[in-house]
Amino acid sequence: MDKKNLKRRIAMSLCGVIICAVSVGIFKIAALGVDPFQSFMAGLDAIVPIGFGTLYAITNAVLLVFALVFDRHYIGIATFINLFLLGYITQFTYEALQKAMPDPSITVRIICLVVGVVVICFGSALYMTADLGVSTYDAIALIICNTWKKGKFQYVRIITDLVCVILGVVLFLMAGGLFSQIPTIAGIGTIITAFFMGPLIEFFNVHIARPLLKNASSS
């Protein structure tokens, strides 16, 4: 990999993670459900009295140790960009949106959900196409599937996602959350991200992310 190509991949990873972080903040202000790992983080955030950015970094550091012990192949530059930046940018985005929209209507929340889905798919396409490592959470399913040979990835990922959502809901309720509030962390947004992100990510891969990388290689 030449230097120019590597620089382009690092830039794509950085931009992808930042865009994904902003999207999670948008999901949180929509309060209609987030992706499975963020459901777990929302439950953890409700019960642990520290800032979301710091909590995200600590949680991912624990998962990083797991990945380093069992298969460090999946750890790269993008893993550390994700670990140190995503939580803090998400916290900043959410707090800024809260100030701008302290009491959003259901229409605004639905618009935020749609925008959040599109934005996270765009960021994911950049981040994944750069191919400089995966998030520590993504590494878990890959290790179980490819290193431990314990099933096909799609089924292992469904199980890990379900575990995250269940743990998130349990932690949220333990922290004093109401049953009626569960859809804010595990709702329609969670279902949409689970079933509809793939095609949209592939759309951005084909039309934006891969051409960006191809142009860097050919120039």
Image (cartoon, rainbow, N blue to C red):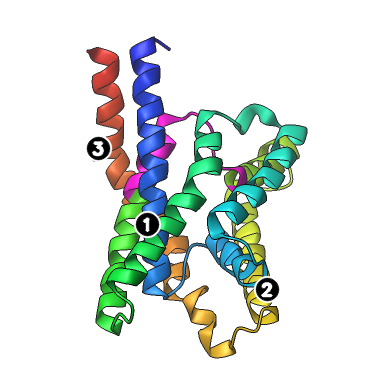
The residue drawn where x is 39% and y is 44% is: 18
Q: Amino acid at mark 2?
A: Leu
**For residue 106, what is the image quadrant?**
bottom left
Disc ID at residue 171:
2
Q: Quadrant of the N terminus?
A: top left
Q: Is residue 37 above or below residue 100?
A: above
Single out the mark in the foreground, 3 or 1: 1
Residue pointed to by mark 3: 208
Real-space Cα distance between discs 1 and 2? 23 Å
**For residue 212, what is the image quadrant?**
top left
Q: Residue 53 at x, y = what percent?
A: 54, 54
Q: Quadrant of the C terminus?
A: top left
Residue 209 located left or right of residue 45: left
Residue 25 located left or right of residue 66: left
Q: Earlier in the sequence, mark 3 or mark 1?
A: 1
**Residue extent of the magenta highlight:** 122-137
Q: Residue 135 at x, y = what percent?
A: 55, 42
Residue pointed to by mark 1: 23
Q: Amino acid at mark 1?
A: Ser
Assess whether mark 2 and mark 1 are in contact (beta carbons under 8 angstroms): no
